[in-house]
Amino acid sequence: MTPEKFMARAIEIGRAGLRTKDARPFAAVVVKHGKIVGEGRSQQKTLLDPTAHGEIVAIREACGRLGTADLSGCELYTTCEPCPLCVSAIWWAKISKMYYAHTQEDCERIGFSTKALVDEVRRPRASRKLPSERICVGEAEMLFQEWAAEGMRIHGAAAQSPSSGYPHR
Ligand SMILES: [Zn+2]
């Protein structure tokens, strides 16, 4: 299958989604070694899950099917350039390459703007709209220390180093 064929499948899933409760034109597929291993479309309303964007639903399905949270070597095809939430999911899943059709600007054209979210993510923490307050620092530090004493002993320190950019979750 060509990249265009996989994208055509994502578009087909998005089109089918228009006739559902969610009715949003966003869908994605995850491909490994030329085979689709995960498919998803926007399902926030049907799943009652604000994170159920097409990319995330597809990543969850792929991880479940492959029995891993590591999608290295997989490609993701999405009908629209991903929002910051999905960029993060793609990052954590270690997807190797992404193909997209519409851009975020195209999404804005039909009323789905992610600009406010992108702006929020870019702002320094103290300037964000979401009020946040740092609490329980000492107790949380204890948790880190317990992890250092037990987690690293169980899972191995070197392989799970947070500084690798892909900390084990
Ligand atoms: Zn998204």
Image (cartoon, grey):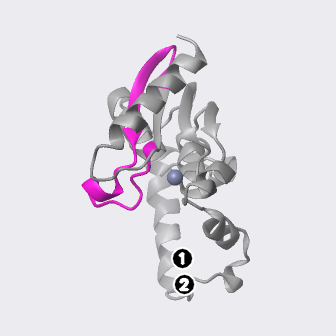
Crowding at label 1, few (<14), some or many (≥20) Cα neighbours within 10 Å?
Answer: few
**Residue found at the far top of this picture:** 1
Q: Would you say 33 lies left or right of 64 here?
A: right
Question: Disc 2 marks which amino acid?
Answer: Val
- Residue span colored magenta: 31-54
Pick whichever, 167 or 128, lies toward us: 128
Pick whichever, 109 or 145, lies toward us: 109
Could you tell me residue 165's position as x and y percent? 67, 49
Could you tell me residue 12's position as x and y percent? 41, 29
Question: Disc 1 marks which amino acid?
Answer: Glu
User: Label for residue 137?
Assistant: 2
Marks 2/1 in contact by CB < 8 Å: the verdict is yes
Crowding at label 2, few (<14), some or many (≥20) Cα neighbours within 10 Å?
Answer: few
Could you tell me residue 140's position as x and y percent? 49, 77
Image-quadrant location for residue 4: top right
* Residue at figure coordinates x 47%, y 36% from the top left: 28
Judged from the image, the secondary structure of the residue bearing numbered disc 1 is helix
Can residue 167 be seen by looking at this rendering?
no
User: Label for residue 141?
Assistant: 1
Residue at mark 2 to residue at mark 1: CA–CA distance: 6 Å
Q: Is residue 139 shown in magenta?
A: no
Question: Is the residue indicated by label 1 positioned so its CB lies within 8 Å of ligand 1?
Answer: no
Q: Would you say 26 lies left or right of 43 here?
A: right
Vertical placement of residue 6 versus 78, above or below = above
**Residue found at the far front of this picture:** 110
Q: Is residue 50 shown in magenta?
A: yes
